[in-house]
């Protein structure tokens, strides 16, 4: 409940600052309201976030805050406003490091757009950079002060990093994956927008490449920011070898898209939104949102077979009891997925939890002299072999002897709700610990 409360506070902050920024971007505030209302049609904000996201809402709130802070800075470039923008950017980076993609894209857009070039070509900009650095410094010092942190220590599996992402065929596949995710991220917002406002937005398309004379956030500047953010994201393919992307990684690239599209609509209809179009849009958003909310209620209260992963209904109290009965008390828990990692930490609060796919240096140090538990979800009790990536992580980073010295089994418990569906959690326990897992 506490995490859910924080999540909804962050969403409120996000939409509040999006609307406040929109009031300064649009000449008619009604368009700002329509644009922000449309965020409920983006799957990430309208559905996914209500299930489990935490860092993404924090970053989204900071992105919206940075839109507003940058807008106020462009109106009056004072030291205080540079500091405020730096504070928001520092907090956004702590929410998710990928926030820096949006920050870098905005700086590049300022370089290209001569209206905003004076904002970065001034010593005052150092104030904002300094405040952002101070906010990030404690975390950076903690991370970089450890034994070592690199992409090779675990993020390779999470990002799908591989050498095949750097050859010609792999580059094309990875680029196609990125383009597909960029297309899917704003759905179904983009589809409904096209039906309701597509023709009106098309009328305003000519102004995209013709900036207004004064330093005002417009379609031209937002287009530059989104293009640069997409290009920076794409460089992860040839530079890092990233082969797969996810929708929840896209806010730094496309957070401003709804506002951008409604700015096109306003350009094509400077007299304000027509009542018919506004009613159709708000009705569509409300209808889709009501359906999504109803489906969430069905998923949460009825459980299987109405939910997919059924994370909320997962019977971790019973699974934790089964692991205790199997002989695990405390030590290091190596989990494959963050849902099982978080739930197992709740069941074994004195244990150290390590999620594979993330740098080992980010987790607490081993206590020593205790047990080691590897746990991963399997579709059936008989399918108990650990995933290859999990074994690779355990052997190379935790120095676990994955071939011997362990007991194994599968803990099973029924999901809450009707039906006979069960959650199967396979486990291996080293009673004396193994390597750095103890």
Image (cartoon, rainbow, N blue to C red):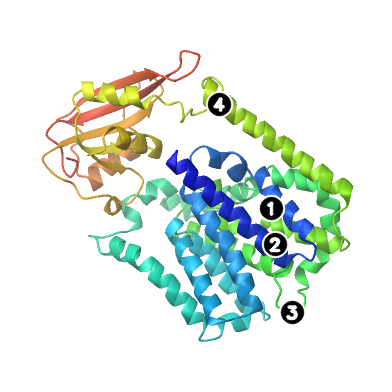
Q: Is residue 347 above or below residue 56?
A: above
Q: Position of residue 296 (x, y in %)?
A: 58, 30
Along the line of sight, the residue nearer the viewer: 388 or 217: 217
Along the line of sight, the residue nearer the viewer: 380 or 372: 372
Q: Which residue is mark 1?
A: 36
| CA distance for labels 2 and 3 | 17 Å
State which tag comes first along the sequence, 3 or 4. Answer: 3
State which tag comes first along the sequence, 4 or 2. Answer: 2
Q: Residues within 10 Å of mark 2 (few under 14, many from 20)?
A: many
**Front tag of 2 and 3:** 2
Kindly indicate whether the residue at mark 1 contacts the one at mark 2 (C-beta within 8 angstroms). Answer: yes
Q: Position of residue 58 (x, y in %)?
A: 49, 53
Q: Residue 377 sits in which quadrant?
A: top left
State which tag comes first along the sequence, 2 or 3. Answer: 2
Residue 103 shows up from this direction: yes
Q: Residues within 10 Å of mark 4 (few under 14, many from 20)?
A: many
**Front tag of 3 and 1:** 1
Q: Which residue is mark 3?
A: 214
Residue 336 shows up from this direction: no
Q: Residue 134 sits in which quadrant?
A: bottom left
Q: Which residue is mark 4?
A: 299
Q: Which mark is residue 22?
A: 2
Q: Is residue 437 above or below residue 112?
A: above
| CA distance for labels 3 and 1 | 25 Å
Q: Residue at x 60, y 75 (%)?
A: 73
Q: Residue at x 62, y 81 (%)?
A: 117
State which tag comes first along the sequence, 1 or 4. Answer: 1
Q: Which mark is residue 297?
A: none
Q: Residues within 10 Å of mark 3 (few under 14, many from 20)?
A: few
| CA distance for labels 2 and 1 | 8 Å
């Amino acid at each position: 409940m506490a995490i859910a409360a924080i999540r909804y506070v962050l969403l409120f902050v996000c939409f509040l600052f999006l609307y406040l920024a929109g009031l300064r971007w649009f000449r008619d505030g009604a368009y700002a309201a329509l644009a922000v209302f449309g965020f409920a049609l983006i799957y990430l904000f309208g559905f996914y976030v209500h299930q489990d996201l935490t860092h993404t809402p924090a970053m989204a709130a900071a992105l919206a805050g940075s839109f507003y802070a940058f807008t106020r800075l462009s109106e009056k470039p004072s030291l205080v406003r540079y500091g405020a923008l730096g504070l928001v950017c520092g907090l956004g980076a702590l929410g998710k490091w990928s926030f820096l993609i949006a920050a870098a894209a905005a700086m590049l857009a300022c370089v290209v757009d001569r209206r905003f070039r004076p904002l970065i070509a001034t010593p005052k900009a150092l104030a904002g950079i300094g405040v952002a650095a101070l906010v990030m410094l404690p975390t950076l010092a903690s991370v970089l002060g450890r034994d070592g942190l690199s992409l090779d220590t675990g993020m390779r599996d999470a990002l799908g990093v591989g050498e095949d992402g750097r050859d010609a065929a792999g580059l094309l596949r990875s680029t196609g994956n990125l383009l597909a995710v960029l297309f899917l991220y704003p759905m179904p917002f983009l589809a409904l927008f096209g039906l309701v406002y597509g023709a009106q937005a098309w009328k305003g398309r000519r102004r995209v490449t013709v900036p207004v004379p004064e330093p005002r956030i417009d379609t031209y500047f937002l287009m530059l920011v989104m293009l640069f953010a997409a290009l920076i994201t794409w460089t992860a393919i040839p530079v890092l070898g990233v082969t797969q992307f996810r929708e929840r990684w896209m806010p730094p690239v496309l957070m401003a898209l709804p506002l951008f599209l409604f700015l096109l609509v306003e350009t094509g209809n400077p007299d304000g939104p027509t009542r018919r179009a506004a009613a159709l849009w708000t009705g569509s958003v409300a209808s889709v949102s009501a359906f999504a909310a109803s489906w969430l209620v069905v998923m949460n209260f009825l459980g299987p077979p109405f939910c997919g992963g059924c994370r909320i209904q997962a019977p971790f109290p019973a699974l934790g009891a089964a692991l205790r009965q199997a002989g695990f008390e405390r030590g290091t828990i190596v989990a494959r997925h963050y849902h099982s990692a978080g739930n197992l930490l709740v069941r074994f609060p004195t244990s150290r939890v390590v999620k594979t796919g993330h740098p080992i240096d980010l987790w607490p140090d081993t206590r020593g002299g205790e047990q080691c538990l590897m746990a991963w979800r399997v579709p059936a009790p008989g399918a108990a072999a650990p995933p290859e990536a999990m074994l690779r992580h355990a052997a190379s980073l935790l120095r676990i002897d994955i071939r011997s010295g362990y007991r194994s089994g599968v803990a099973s418990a029924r999901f809450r709700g009707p039906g006979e569906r069960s959650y199967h959690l396979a486990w291996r326990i080293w009673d004396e610990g193994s390597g750095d897992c103890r």
